[in-house]
Image (spheres, helix red, strand yellow):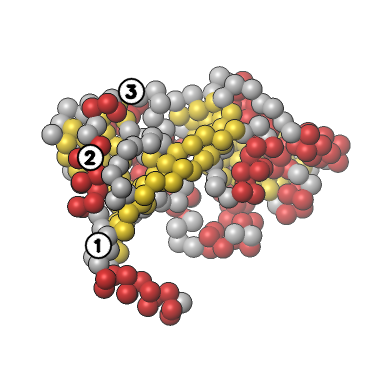
Amino acid sequence: MSNLVHNNQLDKQRWDTFVDADPDATIFNKSFYLDTVCDDWYVYHDEVFTYGLVICVSLKLGLKHVYPPFFHRYSDVIGDQSKLDILELEKVLLTEFSSGIFHLSTKLNFDSQVELKSMYYQQIEDEIVLSNLSKRKIKKIQKEFEIELKADSSSDDIVNLIFDVLPERVPFFKSKDAQKLRKLISEAKKEGVLVTLGAFVNKELVGGLIGLNYHNRLLYLKGVCTDDFTEHGMMYYLMSHFNEMALKNDMGFDFGGSNVEGVRYFNQKLGGRDKHYYKFSWDNNPFWYRFMKKMKKRLL
């Protein structure tokens, strides 16, 4: 028998141990990560933890909805997926949650009530193949500046640079949700999974990257360069070194992924290759809820 268990009733230590034991599990399933980025979350699992998967949830107008939080790409089916009753899971999702956008690393054969869309992110497994554009950008900035790279640079300094620079470029970084990034980085540092790389010119921090190391995989979380150095291609230079750091330590490199074509293009120029995950969605919201949402949009 399977249960939908709220995180407040979950034995989080047992869950984390279960996640750690699955070599294919990503850090998106760890309780510290979920507590930081999700409004609320559940785990669907059987009584003996043969399998389990995370479901991130938000509450709007009194209704529960499955949703993908910022900085959380997908959930994995942890453990033995063959033991998972997919139709039973679908019944629980449609009964408990009036609508959903549910991202999973695995394709599940749900009923026709749930729509399926293939998504993608980029990663490097064993070899970095830079495009000619990337090579030119990297060579050019090396000629123009004397750059000092420091692994394990201060995460606080890089985070401060992120929030100094990005709000003017990306409106999201002016929002309350963006502050979850600060907390996530702080919690990741406590967990011992934080990886940083800073770029210094004349002893001044001009760019930096933050990643998370889990299960021999370096996940790129966020990075930034000041405006002047972005124009000179510093992100190409930094990201290529981040990739090299991962492979030198026998880790795969995960770009974090994006379905935004411009970001995907950048990742591919640095050797990233598409890997698919899946978006499952449904909408059984009542009429009054849809009406309220429509009215809210008109008022904005």
Q: Position of residue 111 (x, y in %)?
A: 28, 44
On-image quarter of the N terminus: top left
**Amino acid under disc 2:** Leu
Where is residue 50, by image quadrant? Answer: top left
Q: Which mark is first along the chain, 1 or 3?
A: 3
Q: Position of residue 225 (x, y in %)?
A: 68, 48
Q: Position of residue 105 (x, y in %)?
A: 41, 36
Q: Secondary structure at mark 3?
A: loop
- Which mark identifies residue 63? 1
**Tag in front: 2 or 1:** 2
Q: Which residue is mark 3?
A: 21
How far apart are the alpha carbons under marks 3 and 1?
Answer: 34 Å
How far apart are the alpha carbons under marks 2 and 1?
Answer: 23 Å
Q: Residue furthest bottom?
A: 299
User: At 23% across and 51% down in the image, what residue appears?
Assistant: 94
Q: Is residue 157 visible?
A: no
